[in-house]
Amino acid sequence: MNKLLGRVLDMAFSALVEPSLRRAKIHAAVYYVEAVRTARKATMVFGALAFCLVIMASGAILIPLALCLFMPWQPDTKAWVACTVGTVYLLVPLIVGIVLMSERHWMRMTRADGLVRDVLN
């Protein structure tokens, strides 16, 4: 009786539980690969943002300062050049940061929008 019950339980386990476990392992592997891919992209975005921050800091301070000190311009012209260059070097990295940190970009980058769409359909 115990051998028969053991065989029935083994058959039930192999027929019902093993396919579910196999699917769960496949899904776990897919999610792991997606997590690694997302972490890689996040690291690349962090590097790009750090680079933009360095450019913004150096541009906001050094370039207008060098232009104003070493060019033989009138004081009014030097002021306009300093303001214009400083504004450009502050706004471009700021815009890049805003675009990269937008919710829409992150939803696309992590493919969470597809996951939400699949769950809702």
Image (tube, grey):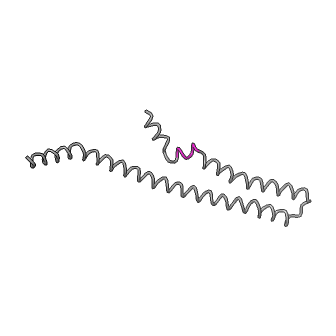
Residue 46 found in image quarter: bottom right
- Residue drawn 50% across and 41% down? 113
Q: In the picture provided, is 28 more to the left or to the right than 76? A: left
| Number of callouts | 0
Give the residue furthest to the left: 1
Q: Image height check: is 114 above or below 45?
A: above
User: Looking at the rendering, which quadrant does residue 60 occupy?
Assistant: bottom right
Position of 110 with respect to 7 (left or right) is right
Image quarter hosting the C terminus: top left
In depth, the one of 87 and 13 nearer the eye is: 13
Q: Nearer the viewer, residue 58 or 15?
A: 15
Relative placement, left or right, of 77 versus 96 is right
Location of residue 71 in the rendering, given as x and y in whole percent from the top left corner = 86, 64
Which residue appears at 58% of the width and 44% of the height?
103
- Reply yes or no: does residue 20 show up in magenta: no
Left or right? Give the position of 14 relative to 108. left
Establish if 63 lies above or below 100. below
Residue lying furthest top in this view?
121
Taking depth in this image into account, of 82 and 4 the one nearest to the observer is: 4
At 49% from the left and 43% from the top, the residue drawn is 112
Question: What secondary structure characterizes most of the magenta part?
Answer: helix
Q: Percent x, y for residue 52?
A: 66, 58
Q: Position of residue 33 (x, y in %)?
A: 41, 53
Residue 77 pos. (x, y %):
88, 56
Residue stretch rendered in magenta on the structure: 103-108
Seen from this angle, which residue lies furthest front? Answer: 1
